[in-house]
Image (tube, helix red, strand yellow):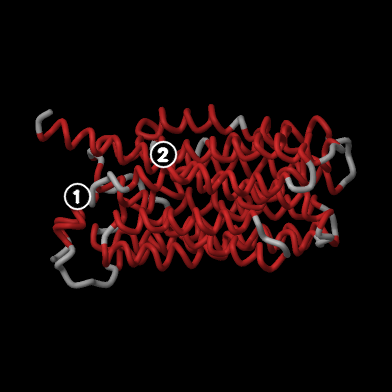
Amino acid sequence: MNKDARTIFASNFATAILGFGIFIATYDIAAISISILVLERTWHISKFLAGFLGASTLIGAAFGALIGGHMADLFGRRGLLIYDFIGYFLASILSAVSINYWMLFTFRFFIGLTIGADYAIVFPYISEMRPKNRVNRDMAIVMLAANFGMIIAYGSGGLFLGLGNYGWRYVLALGGFIALPAIFLRYKILESGHWRRLKKLPFRSFSDHEKRSIVFSSAAWFAYQVGDQGLSIFLPTIMAFILGFGFVNSSYYSLIVKAVTIPAALLTVYTIDKLGKKFLQAYGFLGRSIALLSLGFIIIYGLDIRYYGIVLLLLAYFFGAAGPDKTVVISPVENFRYEVRCTGEGISESFGRIGGIFGVLVFGFLATYTGIGPGILVFGILDLFGFIISALFMSGTIKYREYINNVKT
């Protein structure tokens, strides 16, 4: 195998391994929603405390994104991609054996630290390792793994929760065990060549262009994550309300609803270079907003929602996965120079995680005191905000290699 072939193989291998990591991270975020269904009854916690537990991972992820992204710019991508998953494995197993609410909350927070760091590093790393004409498509493919992660979580929830009150522990522990092969495989990936060349340069602050990019990408990520994480954490609860089922059947029906994200994500992979990220993001936000606002009003006015509710949830998930679910994550990457790329991605992600925390806590509060309808309306309103800012302020693809060359080094 010649040098070029080895380089291509190493790049393809790293992309596949990192996609597996994103799969595991999103599995874990969905897994806690399965556990909450049981813990509300067995630990007698309110919906607000349940939401706070669901938000624990997101709180950790907000800090992990800031810390991990900056450390990756200072010390390199490869080492952090390995060590954050070792931390994830340990925290995941410990969360599965937690004996009370606050012990579980603490370990879920540490899981969030590792997940937040991983997201902040993975996509800049891919942008530095892949050919320029494949970067957008390959990052969308990696994000496709996230959709499978949640589907597997809901499926495993339906399987393990049928085993009794300890089934939720098996759901959480499974995430840790499937992380083991990812840890060993990550030892085989290479350090980013761009980071190796730039590591001796002093750290520099963001340019004015990069600061504006942070403001927009943070706002868009925040707007999407409000509803995305709120729905991810409470989808089984919402399905139980709509269909009147127990937690096992609610998990299975959540899987069915979430499955619509697979064809939507494949559509994104196919069209992202043809239609552009701005088109996909703006109209994805709009379609999702219309679906969620409609669902919220139907629930508030007490209409028969069994069939309409499922259809509207399917539409909301489809439009999200066909656009902003991917683009808010991968778009910030191209707006930052290599030496501050993970830091910029981490800041944007951190605000997105704060949006997720807001969505989970607000939905939990509203579901406790007013019902789930107003909470779903909040998701729709934030998606409408995402459409407006994307349509008005999102730029097209930036030729970042030319931009980087024009920035003084």
Quick check: can you spot residue 81? yes
Query: Image point 84% across, 54% down: which residue?
Result: 41
Element under disc 2: helix
**Left or right: residue 3 compared with residue 206:** left
Q: Position of residue 12 (x, y in %)?
A: 28, 35
Above or below for 234 versus 116: above
Above or below for 26 versus 209: above
> Callout 2: few (<14), some (14-19), or many (20+) C-alpha neighbours within 10 Å?
many
Q: Quadrant of the C terminus?
A: bottom left
Q: Position of residue 395 (x, y in %)?
A: 37, 50
Residue occupied by mark 2? 142
Query: Image point 19% across, 53% down: which residue?
Result: 194
For residue 401, the mark is: 1
Element under disc 1: helix
Identity of the amino acid at label 2? Val
Query: Image point 79% across, 32% down: which residue?
Result: 308
Report the residue that reaches farthest toward the left: 2
Whichever of callouts 2 and 1 sits on the residue coming sooner in the sequence is 2
Q: For the residues carrying marks 2 and 1, which lies nearer the camera in this image?
A: 2
Q: Position of residue 387 (x, y in %)?
A: 54, 48
**Left or right: residue 149 compared with residue 16:** right
Q: Quadrant of the N terminus?
A: top left
